[in-house]
Image: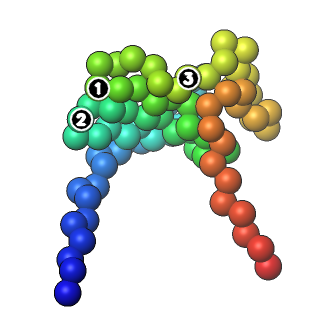
Amino acid sequence: TMQTATPPPVPSRPVILENNLPGVRLTSETGFTSEIYNHGAHVGSWRDGNGDAILFLSKHAQFTPPKAIRGGIPICFTQFS
C-alpha cells in the first residue's frame, strides 16, 4: 500500500488586524505569512519569506462591517440544502 505524507500543521495565532478587526495570521515553515480576517473569512495579506507582498488589499479598502473588504480573496463556504 502507498502511504502519503501528511504535511505538518501551519502555525496560526489569533490577532487583531486592520481597524481592530479580529483574524488569524498563518506562518509556514518557509516564512510565508498570510492574514485572514474573520469578517467575511477574507484573505487580506500573503507575503513571501522575505516579507514581499504577493497579495494585498486595495488602498481604498474599507474595514467597516457590514461592508465587504475591498481586494484580497473572500473565502466562501456555500451550503446547499
**Residue 14 vs residue 6: left or right?**
right
Q: Nearer the viewer, residue 56 or 36?
A: 56
Question: Real-space Cα distance between discs 2 and 3?
Answer: 19 Å
Which numbered disc, 3 or 1, marks the residue that appears first in the sequence?
1
Residue drawn at 23 percent across, 56 percent down: 8
- In percent of width and height, residue 50 lies at 29, 19
Q: Is residue 17 visible?
A: no
Tag 1–tag 2 contact (CB < 8 Å): yes
CA separation, marks 1 and 2?
6 Å
Relative to 71, is 10 on the left or the right? Answer: left
Measured along the vertical axis of the image, is residue 56 above or below residue 35?
A: above
Residue at numbered disc 3: 56
User: Does the residue at mark 3 contact the one at mark 1 (Cβ under 8 Å)?
Assistant: no
Name the N-terminal-most of marks 2 and 3: 2
For the residues marked 3 and 1, what is the alpha-carbon distance in whole angstroms? 15 Å
The outermost residue toward the bottom is 1
Q: Are marks 2 and 3 in contact (CB under 8 Å)?
A: no
Where's the C terminus, which quadrant? bottom right
Would you say residue 1 is visible in this rendering? yes
Residue placed furthest toward the front: 1
Position in image of residue 79 (x %, y %): 73, 69
Please give the name of the residue rendered at 23% of the width and 35% of the height, measured from the top-left corner.
Answer: 30
Q: Which residue is mark 2?
A: 30
